[in-house]
Image (tube, rainbow, N blue to C red):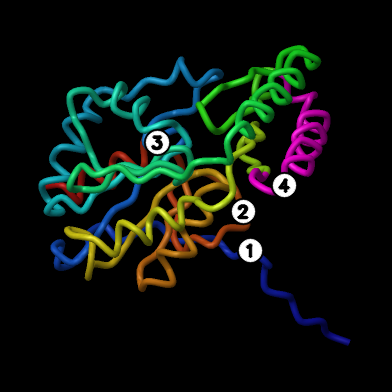
């Protein structure tokens, strides 16, 4: 008896359109590490590709200011990388946000809880050779890109810390990283906050990112009538479009900014 071939569970995603019609109707939300710029073994080693500052300046002007960064880095770290350019930005996966008017919005963990989580995460990293502890102030990351064999141990220890402090903290897995972050914000909530304010309000959101943390933004962009662009081969994804790598994203953005 003849059999019917099943459709793939994760069909290939198309590239985003070469042009976005009526450019004044769009809002752009961009992740940095692994999306705008190539991933580095350590966060401090990341660097913007030549021409990225100028590209973002042009795109910001083209979109009438409706361009924001959504990153796991603190906003201060984004500013240092982009200096002297200052863009609307959400850092720490949405826990802190500088809107287009320059006003700050921050989530704060319960007094003393950040200190306890910091100590536990730092101690966990010290027990695992090759694992890097990153202190983001109120959020704490365990990077195992240089020790991929430590993945199971890192995730288990981080999950235990999150469970112990579940009243205020949660585990956010990412690309070769486990992050302990305060509950209550993510890249999706940050995108929605921007979309309620000028110059983003009333526009169609497009979010580009490579990591699990970007899925929150992809889902909210789709809910608001836009779409997500996943960078790289990670699947499944809530994104409706994809690009192969950061160079492909920069090339696409360059076409939009002329």
Does residue 160 sit above or below 16 in this rendering? above
Label 3 residue SS? loop
Label 2 residue SS? loop
- From the image, tell me which residue sits under label 1: 10
Name the residue located 40 percent from the left edge and 41 percent from the top edge: 96
Distance Cα–Cα, label 4 vs label 1: 33 Å
Query: How far across and down, in percent of the image, does residue 132 sit?
Result: 64, 17
Decide which of tag 1 and tag 3 comes sooner along the chain. Answer: 1
Distance Cα–Cα, label 2 vs label 4: 28 Å
Q: Nearer the viewer, mark 3 or mark 4?
A: 4
Res. 163 image quadrant: top right
Seen from the viewer's position, the closer of residues 149 and 68 is 68
Which quadrant does the N terminus fall into?
bottom right
Label 1 residue SS? loop
- From the image, tell me which residue sits under label 4: 166
- From the image, tell me which residue sits under label 3: 32
């Amino acid at each position: 008896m003849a059999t019917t071939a099943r459709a793939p569970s994760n069909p290939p995603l198309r590239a985003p359109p070469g042009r976005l019609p009526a450019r004044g109707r769009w809002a752009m939300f961009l992740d940095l590490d692994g999306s705008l710029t190539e991933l580095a073994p350590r966060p401090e080693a990341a660097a913007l590709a030549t021409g990225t500052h100028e590209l973002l300046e042009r795109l910001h002007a083209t979109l009438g200011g409706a361009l924001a960064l959504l990153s796991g880095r603190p906003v201060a770290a984004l500013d240092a990388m982009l200096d002297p350019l200052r863009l609307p930005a959400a850092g720490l996966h949405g826990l802190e946000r500088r809107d287009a008017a320059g006003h700050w919005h921050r989530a704060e963990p319960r007094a003393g809880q950040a200190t306890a989580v910091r100590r536990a995460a730092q101690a966990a990293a010290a027990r695992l050779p090759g694992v890097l502890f990153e202190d983001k102030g109120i959020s704490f990351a365990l990077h195992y890109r240089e020790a991929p064999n430590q993945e199971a141990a890192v995730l288990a220890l981080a999950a235990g810390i999150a469970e112990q402090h579940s009243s205020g903290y949660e585990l956010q897995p990412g690309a070769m990283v486990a992050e302990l972050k305060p509950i209550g914000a993510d890249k999706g909530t940050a995108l929605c906050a921007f979309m309620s304010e000028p110059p983003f309000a009333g526009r169609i959101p497009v979010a580009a990112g490579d990591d699990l943390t970007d899925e929150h933004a992809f889902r909210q962009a789709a809910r608001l009538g836009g779409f997500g662009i996943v960078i790289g081969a990670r699947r499944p994804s809530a994104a409706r479009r994809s690009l192969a790598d950061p160079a492909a994203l920069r090339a696409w953005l360059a076409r939009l900014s002329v």
